[in-house]
Image: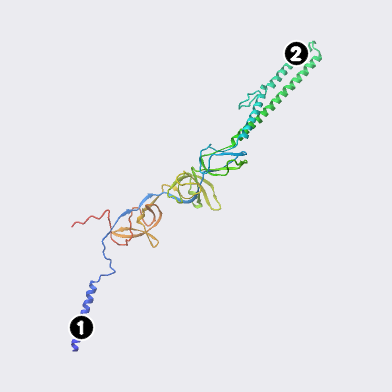
Amino acid sequence: MKFGLVCMALMAVFLGTMLTGCNRQSAPDSKRPVDQPPRLVQFEPAQIRVWPQILQVTGTLAAQERVVLSAKVAGRLETVTVDIGSNVRKGDVLATIEPRDYELRLAQAAANLAQARAMLGLPSEGNQDIVQLDEVTAVRQAQAVLDEATKSRQRIRDLQRAGIASQSELDTAEATYAVAVTRHETAREEARTRLASLGGFRAAFELAAKQLADATIRAPFNGVVQDRTAGIGEYLSPGTPVLQLVQTDPLRLKLDVPERSAALIRLGQTVHLRVEGDTNDYAGSIARISPALVERTRTLLVEADIPAQGNLRPGLFARAGIVFDPSAETLTVPDSAVIVFAGLEKVFTAKDGRAVERAVITGRRDAANIEILRGLEAGESVILTPAGLQTGQPVQDQVNPPAPQRS
């Protein structure tokens, strides 16, 4: 009985050992990689591309010109031909002050000027007020009397030496000559006075004409009316604001460039900008550079001229890029080749038909490419859309598969 039990126990141990051995032989080694079919992928070589160097700054759009149009003369506002938002051209009449008072002043000044010209022997109308004193009628008349007195005195002197004329006749001739000289000088002085008065009347006439012209407010440049501050019928004193006019084409883009980048800025450099709420990209060029930095902010004030277009208008905040090196080259890969894991950027290349992970440092981005600053060399092929790949995983180029082996 005991011998039977022992035999049964030995038999059980033997069978257990056999089963355990079979299980160990059939279980795969979990540490050994299991061969997988190659994953079809696309490759793209890292390329050197022309990618302009751009300095990113912020700024504000402002009007090219801004002016407050005021009344230059006193009077009641008679007409206003524009309002807020009106487009105007240089020289357009924007508002007028009642002109009647200034028309009367101009007529009075014109009459005084014509009288002064006539007294000097000039035509009543004309713009030339140049006259020779000896050509004035009163001076010519006095000169004729003086010439006659001179001849008469000389004749009496000759007769007196010959004993024909008496001393009293000579004295009378000398007195007549002295009176003629005095009248001639007086006539010249009066002519000088009238000529000076003519200058005064001319100035008064031109002033009256200017005041009449100033009663009309005209646009000093092409622009748009931003504000209207006076109404028809309102009495205006000199200097009272009437309209505010701005020139919006081109616009001024005022940019603050940091001190460390100030040396990169040059006149004529291209500027690209965008404004809030607008997806369009606008462009202009650097037109003005301040000669000194702003000490408080340590920035350089730069202005660019931007053609008016789209939704651009004064006062908008803008994000701008100044192209300071348009021919700069850099290494790039397609945007889809770079993945981010745990804050690290990486790409995948292939070696001997297996994926190889490469850590990279990236720079700028656009809609299709990413700049590679470190981690790749030009010409190295990277895998597009590498999501889910692991290092060592078999990969195969789906565009250029390997040729089949012949038996």
* Residue 132, above or below 387: above
Please state the horizontal and vertical placement of residue 97, each as a whole percent of the image. Answer: 59, 38
Please tell me how crowded label 2 is: few (under 14), some (14-19), or many (20+) other residues with Cα within 10 Å.
some
Please tell me how crowded label 1 is: few (under 14), some (14-19), or many (20+) other residues with Cα within 10 Å.
few
Relative to 214, is 50 on the left or the right?
Answer: left
Task: Name the residue at the bottom extreme.
Answer: 1
Q: Amino acid at mark 1?
A: Leu
Rendering colour mode: rainbow
262 or 338: nearer the viewer: 338
Please state the horizontal and vertical placement of residue 73, each as a whole percent of the image. Answer: 62, 38
Secondary element type, mark 1: helix
* Residue 192, above or below 243: above
Quadrant housing residue 191: top right
Q: Earlier in the sequence, mark 2 or mark 1?
A: 1
Label placed on residue 155: 2
Relative to 256, is 126 on the left or the right?
Answer: right
Cα distance, mark 2 to mark 1?
187 Å
Task: Name the residue located 77 percent from the left edge and 16 percent from the top edge.
Answer: 173
